[in-house]
Amino acid sequence: MKLKALYHSHIVMANHPELESFLRKRFDWEFQRGKVDFQRVRSVVSSPRLMSFSARCFSHPGLVIAGESYLSQHTMIADGYRKTYAISMQDWLEINDFVEKVEWCEPFDKAVMNVQVWPFTPSELGPFAMAVAVALSFSPMELRAESRISLAVDELVEEWGYYADDL
Protein backbone atom coordinates (compact mmCIF):
# COMPACT_ATOMS: atom_id res chain seq x y z
CA MET A 1 0.00 0.00 0.00
CA LYS A 2 1.37 3.38 -0.99
CA LEU A 3 0.74 6.38 1.25
CA LYS A 4 -0.51 9.47 -0.57
CA ALA A 5 0.35 11.82 2.26
CA LEU A 6 2.07 11.60 5.56
CA TYR A 7 0.70 13.59 8.48
CA HIS A 8 3.40 15.58 10.23
CA SER A 9 2.96 16.82 13.76
CA HIS A 10 4.42 20.29 14.11
CA ILE A 11 4.62 22.17 17.37
CA VAL A 12 4.99 25.92 17.04
CA MET A 13 5.35 28.83 19.44
CA ALA A 14 2.74 31.54 19.97
CA ASN A 15 4.86 33.99 17.98
CA HIS A 16 4.49 31.82 14.85
CA PRO A 17 3.80 34.14 11.89
CA GLU A 18 0.08 34.23 11.12
CA LEU A 19 -0.70 31.96 14.08
CA GLU A 20 -4.45 32.45 13.73
CA SER A 21 -4.57 31.38 10.07
CA PHE A 22 -2.15 28.50 10.79
CA LEU A 23 -4.53 27.16 13.45
CA ARG A 24 -7.60 27.79 11.27
CA LYS A 25 -6.06 25.65 8.53
CA ARG A 26 -4.82 23.04 10.99
CA PHE A 27 -8.27 22.65 12.57
CA ASP A 28 -10.38 23.40 9.50
CA TRP A 29 -12.38 20.19 9.83
CA GLU A 30 -13.22 20.96 13.48
CA PHE A 31 -14.11 24.61 12.74
CA GLN A 32 -16.57 23.45 10.08
CA ARG A 33 -18.47 21.69 12.85
CA GLY A 34 -18.43 24.55 15.39
CA LYS A 35 -16.16 25.75 18.16
CA VAL A 36 -12.84 23.97 18.62
CA ASP A 37 -11.59 22.59 21.93
CA PHE A 38 -8.62 24.68 23.08
CA GLN A 39 -6.91 21.45 24.15
CA ARG A 40 -6.28 20.94 20.42
CA VAL A 41 -4.34 24.23 20.37
CA ARG A 42 -2.34 23.09 23.40
CA SER A 43 -1.29 20.04 21.35
CA VAL A 44 0.31 22.14 18.58
CA VAL A 45 1.37 25.41 20.27
CA SER A 46 3.85 25.29 23.13
CA SER A 47 3.48 27.19 26.39
CA PRO A 48 5.59 30.34 26.34
CA ARG A 49 6.38 30.18 30.06
CA LEU A 50 9.99 29.03 30.45
CA MET A 51 10.16 30.02 34.11
CA SER A 52 8.21 32.06 36.61
CA PHE A 53 8.95 33.58 39.99
CA SER A 54 8.10 36.46 42.30
CA ALA A 55 10.36 39.51 42.48
CA ARG A 56 10.52 42.94 44.07
CA CYS A 57 8.72 45.29 41.72
CA PHE A 58 10.89 46.74 38.98
CA SER A 59 10.23 48.43 35.69
CA HIS A 60 11.60 47.52 32.30
CA PRO A 61 10.37 48.42 28.81
CA GLY A 62 10.14 44.71 27.95
CA LEU A 63 7.60 43.89 30.67
CA VAL A 64 4.10 43.12 29.37
CA ILE A 65 0.98 42.30 31.40
CA ALA A 66 0.45 38.51 31.40
CA GLY A 67 -1.17 35.71 33.38
CA GLU A 68 -4.07 36.58 35.68
CA SER A 69 -3.39 40.29 35.17
CA TYR A 70 -3.96 39.91 31.42
CA LEU A 71 -7.10 37.87 32.04
CA SER A 72 -8.42 40.59 34.37
CA GLN A 73 -8.09 43.15 31.56
CA HIS A 74 -9.81 40.97 28.94
CA THR A 75 -12.37 38.92 30.89
CA MET A 76 -14.60 39.23 33.94
CA ILE A 77 -12.01 37.71 36.31
CA ALA A 78 -10.60 39.91 39.07
CA ASP A 79 -6.82 40.26 39.17
CA GLY A 80 -4.84 38.10 41.56
CA TYR A 81 -3.22 39.56 44.64
CA ARG A 82 -0.15 40.64 42.69
CA LYS A 83 0.44 41.76 39.10
CA THR A 84 1.91 39.31 36.60
CA TYR A 85 4.21 40.33 33.77
CA ALA A 86 6.01 38.51 30.96
CA ILE A 87 9.47 39.39 29.69
CA SER A 88 11.57 37.89 26.90
CA MET A 89 14.46 35.58 27.73
CA GLN A 90 16.81 38.01 25.99
CA ASP A 91 15.70 40.91 28.20
CA TRP A 92 15.73 38.70 31.29
CA LEU A 93 19.34 37.64 30.70
CA GLU A 94 20.35 41.30 30.56
CA ILE A 95 18.72 42.24 33.88
CA ASN A 96 18.53 39.09 36.02
CA ASP A 97 21.56 40.02 38.14
CA PHE A 98 19.80 43.22 39.20
CA VAL A 99 16.36 41.78 40.01
CA GLU A 100 15.64 40.70 43.56
CA LYS A 101 13.72 37.43 43.55
CA VAL A 102 11.35 36.86 46.46
CA GLU A 103 10.88 33.43 48.02
CA TRP A 104 8.24 34.46 50.56
CA CYS A 105 6.08 37.54 51.16
CA GLU A 106 2.71 38.57 52.53
CA PRO A 107 -0.11 37.74 50.07
CA PHE A 108 -1.05 41.36 49.33
CA ASP A 109 2.45 42.86 49.31
CA LYS A 110 2.23 45.53 46.58
CA ALA A 111 6.03 45.67 46.36
CA VAL A 112 6.14 42.18 44.83
CA MET A 113 5.19 41.10 41.31
CA ASN A 114 5.07 37.81 39.42
CA VAL A 115 7.36 37.44 36.42
CA GLN A 116 7.15 34.94 33.58
CA VAL A 117 10.11 34.54 31.21
CA TRP A 118 9.07 33.81 27.62
CA PRO A 119 11.33 32.73 24.70
CA PHE A 120 10.17 35.67 22.54
CA THR A 121 9.25 39.32 23.02
CA PRO A 122 5.67 39.40 24.35
CA SER A 123 5.01 42.95 23.14
CA GLU A 124 5.44 41.82 19.51
CA LEU A 125 2.38 39.54 19.65
CA GLY A 126 -0.94 40.55 18.14
CA PRO A 127 -4.18 40.18 20.12
CA PHE A 128 -4.88 36.59 19.04
CA ALA A 129 -1.33 35.33 19.60
CA MET A 130 -1.16 37.09 22.98
CA ALA A 131 -4.46 35.52 24.08
CA VAL A 132 -3.18 32.09 23.03
CA ALA A 133 0.16 32.66 24.78
CA VAL A 134 -1.50 33.76 28.02
CA ALA A 135 -3.95 30.85 27.91
CA LEU A 136 -1.11 28.38 27.35
CA SER A 137 1.06 29.95 30.06
CA PHE A 138 -1.17 28.32 32.69
CA SER A 139 -0.24 24.72 33.39
CA PRO A 140 -3.00 22.10 33.37
CA MET A 141 -2.50 21.73 37.13
CA GLU A 142 -2.98 25.48 37.68
CA LEU A 143 -6.16 25.40 35.62
CA ARG A 144 -7.54 22.45 37.59
CA ALA A 145 -6.66 24.09 40.90
CA GLU A 146 -8.28 27.44 40.00
CA SER A 147 -11.59 27.01 38.21
CA ARG A 148 -11.99 30.80 37.96
CA ILE A 149 -8.86 30.94 35.78
CA SER A 150 -10.12 28.09 33.62
CA LEU A 151 -13.44 29.92 33.15
CA ALA A 152 -11.60 33.14 32.26
CA VAL A 153 -9.46 31.31 29.68
CA ASP A 154 -12.67 29.95 28.15
CA GLU A 155 -14.08 33.48 27.99
CA LEU A 156 -10.82 34.78 26.48
CA VAL A 157 -10.59 32.28 23.61
CA GLU A 158 -14.28 32.05 22.69
CA GLU A 159 -13.98 35.25 20.61
CA TRP A 160 -11.89 33.27 18.10
CA GLY A 161 -14.09 30.18 17.97
CA TYR A 162 -12.51 28.05 20.70
CA TYR A 163 -13.84 26.71 23.97
CA ALA A 164 -11.84 25.77 27.01
CA ASP A 165 -14.32 24.38 29.52
CA ASP A 166 -12.47 21.08 29.84
CA LEU A 167 -9.19 22.62 30.94
Image: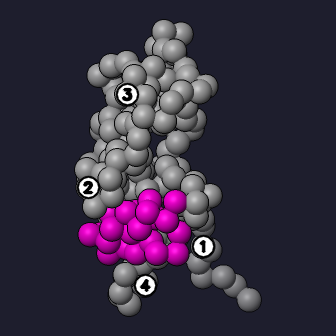
**Residue underneath mark 3:** 110
**Residue underneath mark 4:** 29
Disc 4 and disc 2 in contact, CB within 8 angstroms: no
- Which sits in the foreground, 66 or 5? 66
* Label drawn at residue 157: none
**Residue underneath mark 2:** 74
Residue 149 place in picture, x, y as percent: 44, 59
SS at mark 1?
A: loop
Q: Which residues are magenta?
A: 146-167
User: Upstream in the sequence, badge 1 or badge 3?
Assistant: 1
* Residue 90 seen in render: no
User: Upstream in the sequence, badge 1 or badge 4?
Assistant: 1
Distance from Cα at disc 2 to Cα at disc 3: 22 Å
Left or right: 108 as drawn, with respect to 65: right
- The nearer-to-camera label among 3 and 4 is 3
User: Upstream in the sequence, badge 2 or badge 3?
Assistant: 2
**Residue underneath mark 1:** 7
* Residue 110 seen in render: yes
Write the residue at 55% across / 31% down: 53
